[in-house]
Image (spheres, coloured by chain):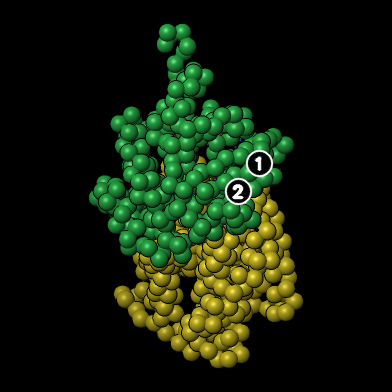
Chain colours: A yellow, B green
């Protein structure tokens, strides 16, 4: 019984990382209408950024967010300007297709670059308090995992507040709904696309940092993280940006359950099964509208 | 003189949609543009506001060319469009739609006052301020679409078939409001298929057919014109006797 609960608890913690990662992908898809399959590579870069800041500067991984966040946001601005901005002028269908090609290529370049610079060695961030935590009835709650969960909640609240209650956020939502009407109101949608892409990459950066304190990682993890983010986005429903968080938790739980029942080796398969089931039974996603 | 279109041509790929369209909307007037479905009315409005690029010709505001200005800056020059089909932000509230309408620098200068004016013209928008736009009735959606354009206190308001899909009583309502907005000093350029009501309201009118201006007169004269009556006002020459 304890093992089961322990697994579910860890599933939730991991799921919160899936949630914040997928949120970034969903936001970019919802506003720019393009699919960035290099999203997982940005998660990977976030993890390495955290690692090098920890190793090189001795800064606590959670604190490193103060550096990693603006860094990733800036990276998003650069890649949007270089690669994705030219796509935004295309018709929706061509845009999605071309964005797949462009971001697939970008993902390969980033992965190989990381391999070259940082080698394929597995890295992990071991803080002094890594093993600590508290224990409720035999179920362990490590501090790092609790901090991870809390940080994802804070990040999501911050993003929610931005989108819901600021002038910029309303402009982003308006652009997502109807970019022509938004343009008529005076919104420079190219600027909105730029900022939104930066925010999406920053979300990947948060996921990267939190992943670095949770798992070991290598340059090739990007693919899996893109896949998980895609699964979560479809689970949530593509129109439901904030649905990504509960959907991320759900994927984390589902993986935990599968780890208990059919073995950890099949974790990825369970995610895909969940993905296919939702597509068949409820194509608009769990939190999407018809 | 305020808005002037000179020899404007536009196309979709190889298919021309506007052919050397010229017209004027004088300050303070209501100018109607009528014409059958597919004539190019929407294309004309979209070209004026920079959403569609012309192949030739010019759009002038007070003599200054507009067509090189990015679409998002058109509103700063005081031109607001109420688009065909309303194009509201359906997942946002009434108030948020108006706030987005007030995004421009121009709107921000007069925001409080403009909101007050909009709520005065459309009290129902104040009552429903927290409702999602997509939950409103067609008539209220049209009011919101007009309100969203008005909060930027435009000098000229372009309306693309505001009566489309509305019940007759609501059509009257909307046109009364348009008249009031005009009396308050805003120039109105009204595109309509509902020709009779548009002509009753307007000072000046143009007819667009297959991308060409084929008629221009005072609205009053057009209402009496036999050809216009037959083609646009639903009087078969014989039935009318
Ligand atoms: N996006 C588009 N792509 C191709 N052709 C279009 C497009 N929009 C309109 N058209 C064509 O341009 C012509 C004018 O259309 P439109 O400006 O919508 O006319 P109206 O508003 O008077 O009904 C029509 O023949 C229409 O089929
Ligand atoms: Mg039209």
The reply, left or right, for residue B208 in relation to residue A16 is right
Q: Nearer the viewer, residue B88 or B34?
A: B34
Q: Is residue A9 above or below residue A258?
A: below
Q: Quadrant of residue A146?
A: bottom left
Q: Is mark 1 within 8 Å of ligand 1?
A: no
Q: Residue B52 carries which label?
A: none
The reply, left or right, for residue A235 in relation to residue B71 is left
Secondary structure of residue under mark 2: strand
Q: Residue B59 carries which label?
A: 2
Q: What residue is rendered at 55% in x and 91% in y?
A: A58
Q: Quadrant of residue A79?
A: bottom right
Q: Where residue A256 sits: x, y (%)?
A: 46, 62
Q: Which chain carries label 2?
A: B
Q: In this view, does B231 lie above or below A127?
A: above
Q: What residue is rendered at 43% in x and 47% in y?
A: B28
Q: Where residue A97 sits: x, y (%)?
A: 66, 50
Q: In this view, does A71 lie above or below A252?
A: below
Which residue in the structure is indicated by mark 1? Answer: B7
């Amino acid at each position: 019984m304890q093992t089961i609960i322990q697994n579910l608890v860890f599933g939730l913690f991991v799921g919160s990382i899936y949630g914040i990662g997928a949120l970034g992908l969903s936001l970019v898809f919802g506003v720019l209408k393009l699919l960035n399959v290099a999203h997982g590579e940005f998660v990977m870069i976030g993890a390495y950024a955290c690692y090098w800041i920890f190793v090189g500067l001795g800064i606590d991984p959670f604190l490193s967010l103060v550096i990693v966040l603006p860094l990733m946001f800036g990276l998003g601005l650069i890649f949007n300007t270089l690669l994705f901005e030219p796509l935004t002028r295309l018709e929706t269908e061509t845009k999605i297709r071309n964005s797949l090609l462009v971001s697939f290529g970008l993902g390969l370049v980033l992965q190989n670059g990381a391999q070259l610079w940082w080698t394929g060695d597995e890295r992990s961030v071991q803080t002094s308090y890594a093993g600590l935590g508290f224990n409720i009835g035999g179920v362990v709650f490590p501090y790092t995992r609790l901090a991870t969960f809390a940080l994802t909640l804070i990040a999501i609240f911050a993003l929610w507040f931005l989108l819901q209650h600021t002038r910029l956020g309303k402009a982003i939502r308006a652009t997502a709904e109807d970019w022509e009407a938004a343009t008529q109101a005076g919104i420079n949608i190219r600027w909105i696309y730029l900022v939104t892409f930066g925010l999406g990459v920053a979300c990947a950066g948060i996921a990267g940092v939190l992943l670095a304190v949770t798992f070991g990682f290598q340059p090739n993890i990007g693919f899996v993280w893109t896949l998980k983010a895609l699964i979560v986005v479809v689970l949530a429903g593509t129109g439901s940006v904030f649905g990504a968080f509960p959907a991320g938790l759900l994927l984390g739980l589902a993986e935990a359950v599968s780890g208990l029942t059919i073995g950890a080796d099949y974790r990825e398969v369970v995610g895909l099964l969940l993905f296919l089931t939702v597509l068949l039974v409820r194509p608009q996603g769990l939190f999407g509208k018809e | 003189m305020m808005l002037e279109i000179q020899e404007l041509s536009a196309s979709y790929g190889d298919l021309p949609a506007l052919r050397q369209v010229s017209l004027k909307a004088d300050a303070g007037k209501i100018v109607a543009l009528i014409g059958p479905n597919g004539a190019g009315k929407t294309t004309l409005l979209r070209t004026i506001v920079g959403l569609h690029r012309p192949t030739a010709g010019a759009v002038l505001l007070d003599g200054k060319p507009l067509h090189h200005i990015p679409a998002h800056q058109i509103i700063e020059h005081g031109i607001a469009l109420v688009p065909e089909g309303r194009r509201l932000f359906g997942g946002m509230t009434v108030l948020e739609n108006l706030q987005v309408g007030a995004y421009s620098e121009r709107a921000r200068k007069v925001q409080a006052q403009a909101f007050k004016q909009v709520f005065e013209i459309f009290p129902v928008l104040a009552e429903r301020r927290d409702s999602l736009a997509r939950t409103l009735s067609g008539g209220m959606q049209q009011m919101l679409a007009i309100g969203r354009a008005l909060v930027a206190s435009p000098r000229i308001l372009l309306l693309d078939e505001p009566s489309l899909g509305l019940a007759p009583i609501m059509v009257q309502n909307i046109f009364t409001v348009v008249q009031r907005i005009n009396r308050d000093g805003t120039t109105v350029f009204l595109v309509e298929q509902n020709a009779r009501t548009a002509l009753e309201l307007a000072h000046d009118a143009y007819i667009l057919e297959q991308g060409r201006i084929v008629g221009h007169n005072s609205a009053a004269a057009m209402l009496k014109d036999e050809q216009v009556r037959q083609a646009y006002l639903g009087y078969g020459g014989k039935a009318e006797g």
